[in-house]
Amino acid sequence: MRKRALFGIATRSILRNKLRTLLTMLGIVIGVAAVIVMVALGQGAQSMIEQQIKGLGTNMLMVMAGSTSQGGVSQGAGTFNRLTIPDAEKLAREGTTLAAVSPVIFSRGQLIGGAGNWRTSIMGVSPAYQAIRDWSTRSGSFFTEADLRAVRRVVVLGSTVADALFPDADPVGQQVQLRNVPFTVIGVMTPKGQTAGGNDQDDTVIIPYTTAQAHLAGHSRIGQIIASTFSPGDIPAAQEEIRSIMRESHKLAPGEDDDFTIRNQDDIAAAASGTTRVMSMLLAAIASISLVVGGIGIMNIMLVSVTERTREIGIRMAIGARSGDVLAQFLVESIVISVAGGLIGIVLGYAAGIGLARATGWAVAMPPEAALIAVLFSAAVGVFFGFYPARKAAALDPIQALRYE
Amino acid sequence: MPAMTATPPVIRLEAVTRVYNAGQNAVQALAGIDLVIEAGEMVAIMGASGSGKSTMMNILGCLDSPTGGRYELDGTSVTGLTRNELADLRSRKLGFVFQGFNLLSRTTALENVELPLLYDRSGRFFGKESPAPAALRRVGLAERMHHVPSELSGGQQQRVAIARALVTSPSLILADEPTGNLDTRTSVEIMALFQELNAQGITIVLVTHEHDIAEHARRIVEMRDGRIVRDTPVANRRDAARDLAAAGAAA
Ligand SMILES: Nc1ncnc2c1ncn2[C@@H]1O[C@H](COP(=O)(O)OP(=O)(O)OP(=O)(O)O)[C@@H](O)[C@H]1O
Ligand SMILES: [Mg+2]
């Protein structure tokens, strides 16, 4: 039988019951639209995270204390927190692939000044930190090597802190108290926004690490050492170099495990986007349940249709249709319904995605291949759920079918 | 009976039986049928209700297979063919006309007549002009081609059905009570059409309960309890066209 004719028969019999076909399609329409929206949201979130991680700084590498073996972090006794200032200095001195190196000392504390007080995170770093994070100042300037060596009590405010304590004035030159120690504000950083995890990167103050060690007692632990390479291509070589310098610095014997971990931006990005990928896949999976429900709707209607058209099937068989022709006719019909539903669903899904992006400001990414997959998937739903009714039609006995009332 | 023709008979049944529900309550619908129908014949099958006429027509039409015996259609044995092979035989050699017309509703006359061409696998209509309009002209419905069955009278619907049976130029047209749903005058019109087609060389087998209708055939086969009890040529064959003309003149 000619394929065009098959398609014609299918569309004609579908159009014959417009309302019924529309209602049948609705399940697939909603299913496909839901999947598209979920995928779009998931992809949007993922690409936003990737962008933010890129925003962490160019060609950045992180060294953290403790080794990671399979299954997580394992720390041997006595190896706890073995990142030191000499480690950072050795890396800066000997790392040929490293453009800049800075230790990072994390702590938290109360900042008093301007309009009141503000609890925030405190980072003790070296001046190289600014270049590594690729982070400019909004006003004033970052501290210098001289400030570091002189252990000066100078502070650079994150924009959130600056806006909270000094809403109307430029804080540069003002005196503040950080953990009851007087500091002079010398700069305000430009806003960097939220991290992938939803932390405000601008809710922080930055001081020289020497000052942190000298004046903020009890908080002299180095959380991490961050470094940048000259170009992204240097990352693998830099990783190896850091490793050998660190092993030397920590006097690790050959065969002994690293007591530190080096991570690059890709690792961080993968970890962060892995979480969102799982989330968005979960959402898409839930959405695709409605596709299955839609498929069951198609199967139901096709079974009704086969029963209603028993006599027609008998007539077609009597005038020479083979079982295969009847099978193809009903299968094409359910595929046409499901693919048409899929196409409408794509349009609706994209419209909903764009609407959602407009209304909420969420990041929405519309991958074109999602549309293709949706069409193929809905066709597969048509085949899967149309096959049983079609086979039922094809297996009818022509005489009984002709006699059917 | 023409003596010793070179061409094989259109139909040859030898000791054909058909048992329904083989098992406890088995019904022997056909109890050994021997029948030969030559090309160009027009045969009426008569008999009481339940005598097995439809059962035999289904077997002749390759819609059903005999339980026992032999059936040859156009010289080839039909016994043991698969469902698909039977479908191909129906497509190539047979045309059906039913009591209830059995047209597809909401489908125009022309599309109904084109339906068998859709399932043709011989390729003999491929790339040629569709024979459907000509078939409709042959049954006198050229004007009604684009009407759907609900817009046609019973007689017109049966004509469409006959055109559909004709369109593939079959060796044999089978009609099970083709006038069963029609009034007397329309029945005679349909018989006139069958006679005309038969005169053009088409072999026709029809089932009827009415003797008047049966007398339009050349031969009457009578059945009882699944057997053929009488098989006689029609002595005074009715000419439906002439009867119609006479009736028209009398009116
Ligand atoms: N599918 C079937 N299953 C069981 N028995 C059947 C079936 N079809 C027909 N029969 C039986 O076979 C016998 C012959 O039936 P058939 O339909 O051939 O009669 P018929 O001569 O066409 O009768 P009518 O003039 O009423 O149409 C009947 O006894 C009938 O009950
Ligand atoms: Mg009957």
Image (tube, rainbow, N blue to C red):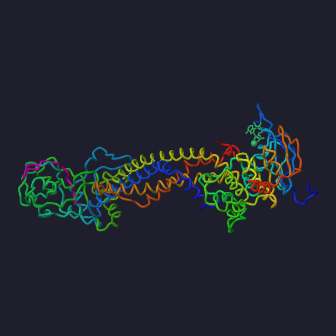
Residue nearest the viewer, comparing B22 with A405: A405
* Residue B72 position in % (x across, y down): 84, 52
Residue nearest the viewer, comparing B72 with A196: B72
How many marks the image carries: the answer is: 0
**Is B37 placed left or right of A245 in the picture?**
right
Q: Is residue A106 magenta?
A: yes
A124 in relation to B134, above or below: above
Occupied quadrant, residue B223: top right
**Is A361 placed left or right of A389 in the picture?**
left
The secondary structure that dominates the magenta segment is strand
Query: Which quarter of the image is occupied by the C terminus of chain A?
Result: top right
Range covered by the magenta-colored residues? A102-117
Residue at the outermost front position: B250
* Residue A121 position in % (x across, y down): 18, 51
Query: Which quarter of the image is occupied by the N terminus of chain A?
Result: bottom right
Occupied quadrant, residue B5: bottom right
Q: Is residue B25 magenta?
A: no
Instruction: Assign ligand 2 to one image quadrant.
Output: top right
* Residue A39 position in % (x across, y down): 39, 54
A296 in relation to A145, above or below: above
Residue at the outermost right position: B3
Residue in the picture at 80% in, 61% down: B200
* Residue A81 position in % (x across, y down): 25, 49
Residue nearest the viewer, comparing B149 with A91: B149
